Image (spheres, grey):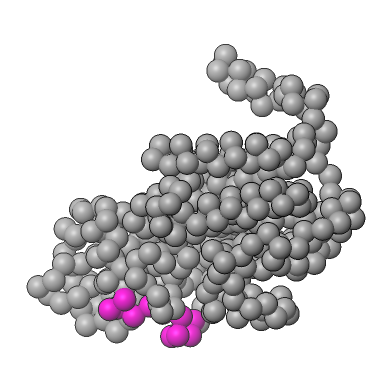
Amino acid sequence: MSDLDKFDYECQNQMSIFDMIREPIRITKPIRLIELFAGYGSQAMALERIGAKFEHYRVVEFDKYAIASYNAVHGTSFPTMDITKVHAEDLDICDTEVFTYLLTYSFPCTDLSVAGKQAGMKKGSGTRSGLLWEVERILKEIRDDGGELPQILFMENVPQVHADANMVDFQNWIDFLTSLGYVSYWQDLNAKNYGVAQNRERCFMFSFLGEYNYHFPQPIPLKKKLKDYLEDDVDEKYYINNEKADKLIKQLIDNGTLPQHNLDRQTDRQTDRQTDRQTDRHALTEQSISHNREKLQTASRQDMTAESQTNSKSETWLLKNRGEVAEKPIDVAVTLMARDYKGLDNYGSNGVIEWK
Protein backbone atom coordinates (compact mmCIF):
# COMPACT_ATOMS: atom_id res chain seq x y z
CA MET A 1 0.00 0.00 0.00
CA SER A 2 1.45 3.35 -1.06
CA ASP A 3 1.67 6.28 1.32
CA LEU A 4 -1.15 7.99 -0.59
CA ASP A 5 -3.37 4.89 -0.42
CA LYS A 6 -2.62 4.56 3.28
CA PHE A 7 -3.53 8.20 3.83
CA ASP A 8 -6.81 7.77 1.94
CA TYR A 9 -7.62 4.63 3.92
CA GLU A 10 -6.97 6.32 7.23
CA CYS A 11 -9.06 9.36 6.27
CA GLN A 12 -11.96 7.18 5.23
CA ASN A 13 -11.92 5.09 8.37
CA GLN A 14 -11.08 7.54 11.11
CA MET A 15 -13.88 8.82 13.32
CA SER A 16 -14.95 12.37 12.71
CA ILE A 17 -15.07 14.71 15.69
CA PHE A 18 -18.74 15.21 14.81
CA ASP A 19 -19.32 11.48 15.40
CA MET A 20 -18.41 12.09 19.01
CA ILE A 21 -20.36 15.27 19.69
CA ARG A 22 -23.45 14.67 17.53
CA GLU A 23 -25.79 11.75 17.83
CA PRO A 24 -26.82 9.95 14.63
CA ILE A 25 -30.22 10.89 13.24
CA ARG A 26 -32.97 8.37 13.98
CA ILE A 27 -36.58 8.67 12.92
CA THR A 28 -38.87 7.11 15.50
CA LYS A 29 -42.09 9.07 14.93
CA PRO A 30 -44.58 8.77 12.06
CA ILE A 31 -43.48 10.71 8.98
CA ARG A 32 -45.54 13.44 7.39
CA LEU A 33 -44.10 14.07 3.93
CA ILE A 34 -44.24 17.55 2.41
CA GLU A 35 -43.06 17.63 -1.22
CA LEU A 36 -42.32 20.96 -2.85
CA PHE A 37 -41.60 20.77 -6.60
CA ALA A 38 -43.05 17.29 -6.26
CA GLY A 39 -43.16 16.18 -9.90
CA TYR A 40 -44.66 12.71 -10.00
CA GLY A 41 -43.42 11.98 -6.48
CA SER A 42 -40.12 10.19 -6.99
CA GLN A 43 -39.05 10.95 -3.43
CA ALA A 44 -42.27 9.52 -2.06
CA MET A 45 -41.60 6.47 -4.22
CA ALA A 46 -38.16 6.15 -2.64
CA LEU A 47 -39.71 6.11 0.83
CA GLU A 48 -42.17 3.47 -0.30
CA ARG A 49 -39.37 1.31 -1.71
CA ILE A 50 -37.48 1.25 1.57
CA GLY A 51 -40.65 0.40 3.44
CA ALA A 52 -40.96 3.68 5.34
CA LYS A 53 -44.34 4.42 6.89
CA PHE A 54 -45.40 7.92 5.94
CA GLU A 55 -48.34 10.15 5.10
CA HIS A 56 -48.60 12.14 1.88
CA TYR A 57 -49.23 15.29 3.87
CA ARG A 58 -48.74 18.21 1.47
CA VAL A 59 -47.78 18.28 -2.21
CA VAL A 60 -46.83 21.41 -4.18
CA GLU A 61 -46.59 20.98 -7.94
CA PHE A 62 -47.46 23.55 -10.60
CA ASP A 63 -47.57 21.31 -13.68
CA LYS A 64 -51.00 19.77 -14.23
CA TYR A 65 -49.60 16.71 -15.97
CA ALA A 66 -47.08 16.09 -13.23
CA ILE A 67 -49.69 16.32 -10.49
CA ALA A 68 -52.01 14.05 -12.47
CA SER A 69 -49.16 11.53 -12.62
CA TYR A 70 -48.50 11.97 -8.91
CA ASN A 71 -52.11 11.25 -8.03
CA ALA A 72 -52.26 8.26 -10.38
CA VAL A 73 -49.07 6.75 -8.97
CA HIS A 74 -49.79 7.35 -5.30
CA GLY A 75 -53.56 7.13 -5.17
CA THR A 76 -53.94 10.72 -3.95
CA SER A 77 -56.03 13.69 -5.09
CA PHE A 78 -53.83 16.76 -4.71
CA PRO A 79 -54.58 19.85 -6.84
CA THR A 80 -51.95 21.89 -8.66
CA MET A 81 -50.25 24.49 -6.50
CA ASP A 82 -47.95 27.39 -7.38
CA ILE A 83 -44.93 27.56 -5.06
CA THR A 84 -44.96 31.36 -5.28
CA LYS A 85 -48.44 31.41 -3.74
CA VAL A 86 -47.77 28.92 -0.94
CA HIS A 87 -47.53 30.26 2.61
CA ALA A 88 -46.58 28.84 5.98
CA GLU A 89 -50.16 28.11 6.98
CA ASP A 90 -50.69 26.05 3.83
CA LEU A 91 -48.13 23.51 5.06
CA ASP A 92 -49.86 23.27 8.45
CA ILE A 93 -46.85 21.92 10.33
CA CYS A 94 -47.94 21.08 13.86
CA ASP A 95 -47.43 18.52 16.62
CA THR A 96 -43.75 17.99 15.87
CA GLU A 97 -43.53 16.11 19.17
CA VAL A 98 -45.78 13.49 17.60
CA PHE A 99 -44.74 13.57 13.93
CA THR A 100 -41.52 13.85 11.97
CA TYR A 101 -42.00 16.33 9.13
CA LEU A 102 -39.83 15.59 6.11
CA LEU A 103 -39.87 18.46 3.60
CA THR A 104 -38.36 17.86 0.16
CA TYR A 105 -37.55 20.76 -2.15
CA SER A 106 -35.79 19.47 -5.26
CA PHE A 107 -36.21 22.72 -7.17
CA PRO A 108 -35.91 22.95 -10.99
CA CYS A 109 -32.45 22.34 -12.41
CA THR A 110 -33.35 24.06 -15.68
CA ASP A 111 -30.95 26.98 -15.16
CA LEU A 112 -28.19 24.90 -13.58
CA SER A 113 -27.93 21.83 -15.79
CA VAL A 114 -25.44 21.70 -18.65
CA ALA A 115 -28.44 20.80 -20.79
CA GLY A 116 -30.12 24.09 -19.90
CA LYS A 117 -29.39 27.78 -20.22
CA GLN A 118 -27.19 27.91 -17.10
CA ALA A 119 -28.76 31.20 -16.01
CA GLY A 120 -28.16 30.35 -12.36
CA MET A 121 -30.28 30.49 -9.21
CA LYS A 122 -29.63 33.93 -7.79
CA LYS A 123 -32.31 35.37 -5.57
CA GLY A 124 -34.57 37.67 -7.55
CA SER A 125 -33.20 36.45 -10.90
CA GLY A 126 -36.57 35.22 -12.07
CA THR A 127 -35.08 31.93 -13.25
CA ARG A 128 -36.81 28.63 -12.66
CA SER A 129 -33.87 27.48 -10.54
CA GLY A 130 -34.22 30.70 -8.58
CA LEU A 131 -37.49 29.31 -7.21
CA LEU A 132 -35.29 27.86 -4.46
CA TRP A 133 -35.70 31.16 -2.65
CA GLU A 134 -39.44 30.62 -2.41
CA VAL A 135 -38.55 27.87 0.04
CA GLU A 136 -36.55 30.43 2.02
CA ARG A 137 -39.59 32.70 2.09
CA ILE A 138 -41.84 29.93 3.38
CA LEU A 139 -39.40 28.85 6.09
CA LYS A 140 -38.97 32.47 7.18
CA GLU A 141 -42.73 32.79 7.46
CA ILE A 142 -42.84 29.75 9.72
CA ARG A 143 -40.05 31.15 11.89
CA ASP A 144 -41.45 34.67 12.08
CA ASP A 145 -44.94 33.40 12.92
CA GLY A 146 -43.53 31.33 15.76
CA GLY A 147 -44.46 28.10 13.99
CA GLU A 148 -42.83 24.69 14.04
CA LEU A 149 -40.16 24.02 11.44
CA PRO A 150 -39.92 20.65 9.67
CA GLN A 151 -37.32 18.48 11.37
CA ILE A 152 -35.75 17.21 8.14
CA LEU A 153 -35.18 18.91 4.78
CA PHE A 154 -34.07 17.05 1.67
CA MET A 155 -32.87 18.32 -1.70
CA GLU A 156 -31.70 16.59 -4.89
CA ASN A 157 -30.31 18.49 -7.85
CA VAL A 158 -27.63 18.44 -10.52
CA PRO A 159 -23.99 18.77 -9.32
CA GLN A 160 -23.86 22.19 -10.99
CA VAL A 161 -25.82 23.48 -7.99
CA HIS A 162 -22.44 23.89 -6.28
CA ALA A 163 -20.36 24.71 -9.37
CA ASP A 164 -18.16 27.80 -9.24
CA ALA A 165 -20.83 29.91 -10.93
CA ASN A 166 -23.43 28.92 -8.31
CA MET A 167 -21.34 28.27 -5.21
CA VAL A 168 -22.01 31.65 -3.59
CA ASP A 169 -25.75 31.13 -3.86
CA PHE A 170 -25.47 27.53 -2.68
CA GLN A 171 -23.44 28.60 0.35
CA ASN A 172 -25.88 31.42 1.09
CA TRP A 173 -28.65 28.85 1.12
CA ILE A 174 -26.75 26.61 3.56
CA ASP A 175 -25.94 29.61 5.76
CA PHE A 176 -29.63 30.50 5.86
CA LEU A 177 -30.54 26.98 6.95
CA THR A 178 -27.83 27.14 9.61
CA SER A 179 -29.38 30.35 10.94
CA LEU A 180 -32.62 28.42 11.46
CA GLY A 181 -30.83 25.73 13.44
CA TYR A 182 -30.29 23.14 10.70
CA VAL A 183 -27.12 21.09 10.25
CA SER A 184 -26.66 20.28 6.55
CA TYR A 185 -24.84 17.42 4.85
CA TRP A 186 -24.41 17.31 1.08
CA GLN A 187 -22.60 15.03 -1.32
CA ASP A 188 -22.58 14.10 -5.01
CA LEU A 189 -23.70 10.51 -5.56
CA ASN A 190 -23.79 8.55 -8.80
CA ALA A 191 -26.66 6.16 -9.51
CA LYS A 192 -24.27 3.58 -11.00
CA ASN A 193 -22.69 3.20 -7.55
CA TYR A 194 -26.01 2.30 -5.97
CA GLY A 195 -27.30 -0.55 -8.08
CA VAL A 196 -28.65 1.40 -11.09
CA ALA A 197 -27.16 0.92 -14.58
CA GLN A 198 -27.03 4.63 -15.26
CA ASN A 199 -24.18 7.12 -15.05
CA ARG A 200 -26.26 9.81 -13.37
CA GLU A 201 -24.54 12.00 -10.81
CA ARG A 202 -26.64 14.20 -8.54
CA CYS A 203 -26.09 16.34 -5.48
CA PHE A 204 -28.06 15.28 -2.41
CA MET A 205 -28.45 17.35 0.73
CA PHE A 206 -30.04 16.56 4.08
CA SER A 207 -30.60 19.26 6.66
CA PHE A 208 -31.52 18.25 10.20
CA LEU A 209 -33.03 20.55 12.78
CA GLY A 210 -30.64 20.09 15.67
CA GLU A 211 -27.16 18.71 16.24
CA TYR A 212 -27.40 15.39 14.46
CA ASN A 213 -24.77 13.36 12.64
CA TYR A 214 -25.31 11.78 9.25
CA HIS A 215 -23.27 9.67 6.81
CA PHE A 216 -24.22 9.08 3.21
CA PRO A 217 -24.47 5.39 2.22
CA GLN A 218 -21.43 3.57 0.90
CA PRO A 219 -21.40 2.46 -2.76
CA ILE A 220 -22.64 -1.02 -3.61
CA PRO A 221 -21.64 -3.29 -6.53
CA LEU A 222 -23.52 -2.91 -9.80
CA LYS A 223 -25.16 -6.28 -10.47
CA LYS A 224 -27.37 -5.51 -13.46
CA LYS A 225 -26.48 -3.86 -16.74
CA LEU A 226 -28.62 -1.65 -18.92
CA LYS A 227 -29.38 -4.46 -21.34
CA ASP A 228 -30.96 -6.39 -18.47
CA TYR A 229 -33.72 -3.79 -18.26
CA LEU A 230 -34.43 -3.03 -21.91
CA GLU A 231 -37.26 -4.65 -23.82
CA ASP A 232 -36.87 -6.41 -27.13
CA ASP A 233 -40.00 -4.90 -28.66
CA VAL A 234 -40.79 -1.25 -27.94
CA ASP A 235 -44.03 0.44 -28.95
CA GLU A 236 -43.51 3.21 -31.50
CA LYS A 237 -45.15 5.75 -29.18
CA TYR A 238 -41.94 5.70 -27.15
CA TYR A 239 -39.80 6.76 -30.10
CA ILE A 240 -38.82 10.39 -30.54
CA ASN A 241 -39.49 11.57 -34.05
CA ASN A 242 -36.81 12.98 -36.32
CA GLU A 243 -38.00 16.58 -36.23
CA LYS A 244 -37.86 16.78 -32.46
CA ALA A 245 -34.57 14.90 -32.35
CA ASP A 246 -32.94 17.29 -34.81
CA LYS A 247 -34.25 20.31 -32.93
CA LEU A 248 -32.94 19.03 -29.62
CA ILE A 249 -29.55 18.11 -31.06
CA LYS A 250 -29.19 21.54 -32.67
CA GLN A 251 -30.01 23.22 -29.37
CA LEU A 252 -27.45 21.05 -27.57
CA ILE A 253 -24.81 22.04 -30.13
CA ASP A 254 -25.77 25.72 -30.07
CA ASN A 255 -25.47 25.96 -26.28
CA GLY A 256 -22.19 24.05 -26.26
CA THR A 257 -23.46 20.88 -24.58
CA LEU A 258 -22.76 18.67 -27.58
CA PRO A 259 -19.24 19.15 -29.02
CA GLN A 260 -19.04 20.88 -32.38
CA HIS A 261 -16.96 18.09 -33.88
CA ASN A 262 -20.07 15.89 -33.89
CA LEU A 263 -21.22 17.96 -36.86
CA ASP A 264 -18.30 16.74 -38.93
CA ARG A 265 -19.64 13.22 -39.17
CA GLN A 266 -20.97 12.64 -42.70
CA THR A 267 -22.35 9.19 -43.34
CA ASP A 268 -24.92 7.33 -45.34
CA ARG A 269 -24.77 3.98 -43.58
CA GLN A 270 -27.79 1.74 -43.33
CA THR A 271 -29.10 0.56 -39.98
CA ASP A 272 -26.87 -2.17 -38.66
CA ARG A 273 -28.75 -4.23 -36.12
CA GLN A 274 -27.05 -6.86 -34.02
CA THR A 275 -28.98 -10.13 -34.00
CA ASP A 276 -26.69 -12.24 -31.86
CA ARG A 277 -27.13 -10.93 -28.34
CA GLN A 278 -24.57 -13.28 -26.84
CA THR A 279 -21.68 -12.10 -29.01
CA ASP A 280 -22.64 -8.50 -28.35
CA ARG A 281 -23.25 -8.82 -24.62
CA HIS A 282 -20.13 -6.93 -23.54
CA ALA A 283 -20.11 -4.33 -26.29
CA LEU A 284 -22.38 -1.39 -27.00
CA THR A 285 -23.39 -1.28 -30.63
CA GLU A 286 -23.60 1.66 -32.94
CA GLN A 287 -26.84 2.19 -34.79
CA SER A 288 -27.12 4.17 -37.97
CA ILE A 289 -30.42 5.48 -39.24
CA SER A 290 -31.04 5.10 -42.96
CA HIS A 291 -30.85 7.99 -45.41
CA ASN A 292 -34.65 8.40 -45.41
CA ARG A 293 -35.11 7.39 -41.79
CA GLU A 294 -38.60 7.33 -40.34
CA LYS A 295 -37.73 7.46 -36.66
CA LEU A 296 -34.92 7.82 -34.17
CA GLN A 297 -34.96 4.89 -31.80
CA THR A 298 -33.65 5.92 -28.41
CA ALA A 299 -32.91 2.54 -26.93
CA SER A 300 -33.25 -1.18 -27.52
CA ARG A 301 -31.56 -4.23 -26.20
CA GLN A 302 -29.38 -4.65 -29.27
CA ASP A 303 -29.00 -0.98 -30.24
CA MET A 304 -27.35 1.19 -27.62
CA THR A 305 -26.69 4.22 -29.79
CA ALA A 306 -28.76 6.46 -32.03
CA GLU A 307 -27.73 8.37 -35.08
CA SER A 308 -29.80 11.16 -36.52
CA GLN A 309 -29.40 11.74 -40.27
CA THR A 310 -31.20 14.13 -42.58
CA ASN A 311 -30.50 14.21 -46.32
CA SER A 312 -27.35 13.76 -48.36
CA LYS A 313 -26.55 17.49 -48.29
CA SER A 314 -27.18 17.86 -44.57
CA GLU A 315 -24.87 17.15 -41.71
CA THR A 316 -25.34 14.15 -39.46
CA TRP A 317 -25.43 14.41 -35.69
CA LEU A 318 -24.45 11.36 -33.73
CA LEU A 319 -25.69 10.70 -30.20
CA LYS A 320 -23.94 7.87 -28.47
CA ASN A 321 -24.39 5.84 -25.32
CA ARG A 322 -21.05 4.14 -24.96
CA GLY A 323 -21.02 3.16 -21.31
CA GLU A 324 -17.69 3.23 -19.55
CA VAL A 325 -14.63 1.05 -19.32
CA ALA A 326 -12.92 0.71 -15.96
CA GLU A 327 -11.02 -2.43 -15.04
CA LYS A 328 -13.47 -4.40 -17.14
CA PRO A 329 -16.21 -3.39 -19.58
CA ILE A 330 -19.40 -2.27 -17.93
CA ASP A 331 -22.76 -1.32 -19.34
CA VAL A 332 -23.90 2.02 -17.94
CA ALA A 333 -26.24 4.47 -19.61
CA VAL A 334 -25.41 8.15 -19.82
CA THR A 335 -28.86 9.63 -20.11
CA LEU A 336 -30.42 13.04 -20.57
CA MET A 337 -33.80 12.59 -18.91
CA ALA A 338 -36.89 14.51 -19.92
CA ARG A 339 -36.86 16.62 -16.76
CA ASP A 340 -33.35 17.80 -17.63
CA TYR A 341 -34.24 19.41 -20.92
CA LYS A 342 -37.37 21.29 -19.95
CA GLY A 343 -35.44 24.41 -20.84
CA LEU A 344 -34.83 23.21 -24.39
CA ASP A 345 -38.37 23.78 -25.70
CA ASN A 346 -38.74 20.04 -25.82
CA TYR A 347 -42.21 19.80 -24.31
CA GLY A 348 -44.33 17.10 -25.86
CA SER A 349 -41.48 14.77 -26.72
CA ASN A 350 -42.18 11.20 -25.70
CA GLY A 351 -38.69 9.82 -25.85
CA VAL A 352 -35.39 9.90 -24.03
CA ILE A 353 -32.19 10.60 -25.91
CA GLU A 354 -29.10 8.86 -24.63
CA TRP A 355 -25.73 10.31 -25.42
CA LYS A 356 -22.20 10.78 -24.21
Q: In x, y percent, where is residue 255? A: 27, 56
Residue 283 visible? The answer is: no
Q: Say if the magenta span includes residue 120.
A: no
Which residue is the extreme one toward the front?
A: 145
The N terminus lies in which quarter of the figure? top right
Tell me where the magenta segment starts and ends, as one range: 234-244
Q: Nearer the viewer, residue 99 or 265?
A: 99
Residue 243 magenta-highlighted:
yes
Identity of the residue drawn at 84% across and 49% down: 27
Q: Return the residue nearer the eye: 25 or 8.
A: 25
**Residue beneath the point at 68% across and 48% down:** 144
Q: Is 279 on the left or on the right of 19, as rendered? A: left
Instruction: Please give the name of the residue rendered at 41% of the width and 57% of the height, measured from the top-left corner.
Output: 127
Above or below 18: residue 284: below
Above or below, 37 against 180 in this view is below
Question: Which residue occupies the extreme top position in the image?
Answer: 3
Percent x, y of residue 9: 65, 23
Q: Is residue 202 above or below residue 287?
A: above
Q: Residue 201 at x, y = what percent?
A: 52, 49
Q: 266 or 75, which is in the foreground?
A: 75
The number of numbered discs placed on residues in the rendered structure image is 0
When asked about the image quadrant of residue 93, the answer is bottom right
Observer able to see residue 340: yes
* Residue 283 vs residue 343, the one in the foreground: 343
For the C terminus, the quadrant is bottom left
